[in-house]
């Protein structure tokens, strides 16, 4: 094969590793779970996840033994096609049975793909620097997943991209490769027993999965790690840098050192997550530790593990991914769901599993490295203690600071953050959050009593400007409000932090809830009882502050509105057609009055009765019709 083609063939391997990681991270761990929630099968999540794990474990073990695809390229092609099918099928409407089937296909596709790729990776990397290509592929996979627009994209877009990437991987398998023997025996720098390595990988995946789920389901922690473009970009670059660092460490220090370093970082991150004030430091340790062991998880079975043949390599790779990958991940997710945190005793136990087998030999052989590490750890500890001893802390994000303001100002005494299931709450405030999700918050902010509206989905129902105006003068913005003014919070920035926290309170299911609001209408009885006099009273009490030419809120905040609220006496009318059937106009007005307009500064008036909404809609409909008739 010409030299150029040999060099190009190595990049096939890096691309396939990157595609596999992107698919698993962005689709299996994000998009598919979002789709389950959106499609209403979240209540049966355990059954669906069990099907995914079953498919992954089964085909990780069976993959090397599948005779129907005897050639590695055919087997990898099949795994990628099954994975693509699972991603694209998830875009269709799914009931529980279909979701279980898609989950099983997802696990099976990933199982076949990972084991085949690890067993025969040299076919696609060649023998020219394969370890570097593994590190590069892993780092690029994590970097792509942390691209802000991709990370925050809809589940449908993420699923589509994951499926298309797998199809691109199928195309890569058709490109010519350099002939490389599959049964290459690799002699690692330090002989580690297979059982010891599998046990260490299992502990690392367990910690990673638990920490990942805890962060994703705890707003205060997520705000300091994966919230905003800066955090996401930093995470992506840390992953890429750590993956390339791992290549150097594997060459110079060996697998044992890498696993120990990965555990030190991951274990430290899990312990730091126990204190929200230290989440920033955890957000640095976590991605570096994950990338270190992720590169090793690919490199060990494919390049570092001693094996006498491709068949033996395949069997061992299957056991690694079945036990460490799938079982370790399931255990970590279960711990996060049941406890909401990683117990320090478990971190200690995992450390014993990872460290003790190598501690003695490493200390004897690497006295200098041990001394330097001990000094670095002591310095970091003293630095951390000096920060906290001086009364300061690691900087918090605005959302985290806002949560503390929410607690310190006693908002919990008048506002709940819990939409009660099977009650009028569901229509007024949004989708129901499970008790398990509420328990993960530290501390939970369910609320003591409800004198004001529920705030569980306030970020989807009120704009930052409306919140700021309401904090400044609640009675002016909401005619019936008994809430006191909190203007003083904006003198030192606490008010802005509180607004940022409230804006973060929204869940994935709110889009589905908005769809239900768009078909809501007032009852026939309330329409029959509606009066123009009652409608005019409601307008003056609730709406005139923004929708009359001299309204106080309109006048005070006019420069800050996304779009100046229309004077409803003259228009213009952006969301309601002035002409057309009056009944349709009244119905649309009733929906806007009740629920507001998402994405604008127009709030809902969820507490108004159907009779008040119908009367206000009748009065507004008449005013709009009259304004349309004016010359």
Image: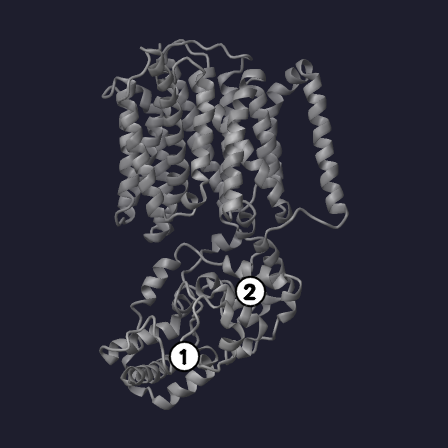
Locate residue 569, reporting x and y percent: 38, 83
Give the number of the disc on residue 410. none
- Residue 144: which quarter of the image? top left
Q: Quadrant of residue 520?
A: bottom left
Residue farthest to the front?
631
Q: Is residue 343 visible?
A: no
Instruction: Residue at 53%, 44% (x, y): give it.
Output: 231
* Residue pictured at 63% horizontal, 47% vertical: 275
Say if 40 sits above or below 556 in the image.
above
Q: Look at the image and tell me in which quarter the C terminus lies.
A: bottom left
Quadrant containing the N terminus is top left
**Nearer to me, 99 or 260:** 260
Q: Earlier in the sequence, mark 2 or mark 1?
A: 2
- Element at label 2: loop
Q: Residues within 10 Å of mark 2 (few under 14, many from 20)?
A: some
| Residue behind mark 2 | 447
Q: Position of residue 610 (x, y in %)?
A: 36, 79
Residue 506 x/y as whole percent? 46, 58
Image height check: is 408 above or below 192?
below
Q: Nearer the viewer, residue 414 or 420?
A: 414
Q: In the visual, does 436 lie left or right of 572? A: right
Q: CA distance from mark 2 to mark 1?
A: 38 Å
Q: Looking at this rendering, what residue extends furthest in the bottom direction? A: 533
Question: In the figure, is residue 290 to the left or right of 619?
Answer: right
Image spot of residue 83 (x, y percent): 30, 34
In front: mark 2 or mark 1? 1
Residue, x 44% and y 57% (percent of image)? 433
Residue that label 1 marks: 567
The answer to whether mark 2 and mark 1 are in CB contact below 8 A is no
Could you say which is closer to the camera, residue 282 or residue 308? 282
* Residue depicted at x 54% and y 71%: 469
């Amino acid at each position: 094969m010409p030299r150029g083609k040999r060099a190009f063939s190595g990049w096939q391997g890096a691309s396939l590793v990157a595609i596999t990681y992107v698919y698993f991270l962005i689709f299996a761990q994000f998009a598919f779970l979002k789709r389950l929630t959106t499609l209403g099968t979240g209540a049966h999540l355990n059954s669906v996840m069990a099907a995914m794990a079953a498919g992954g474990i089964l085909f990780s073990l069976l993959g090397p033994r599948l005779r129907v695809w005897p050639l590695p390229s055919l087997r990898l092609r099949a795994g990628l096609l099954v994975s693509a099918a699972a991603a694209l099928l998830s875009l269709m409407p799914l009931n529980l049975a279909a979701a279980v089937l898609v989950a099983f296909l997802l696990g099976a596709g990933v199982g076949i793909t990972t084991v085949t790729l690890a067993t025969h990776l040299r076919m696609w990397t060649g023998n020219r620097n394969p370890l570097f290509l593994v590190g590069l592929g892993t780092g690029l996979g994590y970097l792509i997943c942390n691209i802000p627009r991709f990370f925050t994209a809809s589940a449908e877009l993420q699923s589509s991209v994951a499926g298309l990437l797998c199809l691109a991987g199928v195309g890569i398998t058709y490109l010519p490769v350099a002939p490389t023997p599959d049964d290459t025996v690799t002699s690692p720098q330090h002989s580690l027993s297979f059982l010891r390595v599998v046990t260490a990988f299992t502990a690392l995946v367990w910690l990673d999965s638990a920490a990942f789920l805890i962060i994703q389901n705890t707003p205060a922690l997520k705000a300091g790690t994966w919230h905003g473009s800066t955090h996401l970009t930093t995470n992506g670059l840390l992953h890429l840098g750590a993956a390339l660092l791992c290549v150097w460490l594997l060459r110079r220090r060996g697998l044992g050192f890498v696993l120990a370093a990965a555990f030190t970082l991951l274990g430290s991150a899990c312990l730091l997550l126990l204190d929200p004030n230290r989440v920033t430091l955890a957000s640095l340790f976590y991605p570096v530790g994950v990338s270190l062991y992720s590169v090793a998880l690919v490199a060990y079975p494919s390049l570092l593990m001693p094996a006498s043949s491709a068949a033996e390599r395949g069997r061992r790779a299957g056991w690694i991914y079945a036990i460490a990958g799938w079982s370790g991940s399931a255990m970590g997710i279960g711990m996060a769901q049941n406890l909401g945190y990683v117990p320090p005793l478990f971190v200690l136990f995992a450390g014993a599993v990872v460290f003790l087998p190598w501690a003695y030999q490493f200390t004897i052989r690497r006295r200098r490295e041990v001394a330097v590490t001990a000094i670095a750890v002591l310095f970091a500890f003293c630095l951390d203690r000096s920060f906290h001893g001086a009364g300061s802390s690691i900087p918090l994000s605005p959302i985290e600071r806002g949560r503390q303001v929410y607690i310190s100002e006693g908002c919990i005494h008048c506002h709940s953050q819990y939409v009660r299931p099977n009650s009028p709450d569901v229509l007024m405030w949004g989708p129901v959050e499970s008790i398990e999700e509420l328990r993960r918050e530290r501390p939970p902010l369910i609320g003591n009593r409800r004198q004001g509206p529920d705030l569980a989905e306030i970020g989807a129902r009120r704009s930052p400007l409306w919140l700021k105006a309401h904090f400044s003068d609640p009675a002016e913005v909401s005619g019936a409000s008994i809430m006191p003014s909190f203007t003083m919070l904006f003198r030192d920035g606490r008010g802005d932090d509180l607004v940022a926290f409230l804006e973060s309170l929204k869940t994935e299911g709110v889009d589905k809830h908005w769809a239900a609001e768009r078909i809501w209408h007032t009852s026939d009885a309330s329409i029959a009882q509606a009066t123009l006099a009652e409608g005019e009273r409601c307008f003056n009490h609730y709406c005139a502050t923004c929708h009359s030419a001299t309204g106080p809120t309109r006048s005070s905040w006019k420069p800050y509105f996304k779009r100046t609220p229309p004077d409803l006496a003259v228009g213009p009318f952006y969301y309601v057609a002035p002409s057309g059937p009056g009944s349709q106009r009244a119905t649309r007005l009733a929906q806007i009055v009740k629920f507001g307009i998402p994405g604008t500064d127009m709030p809902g008036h969820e507490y108004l009765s159907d009779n008040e909404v119908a009367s206000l809609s009748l009065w507004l409909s008449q005013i709009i019709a009259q304004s349309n008739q004016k010359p």
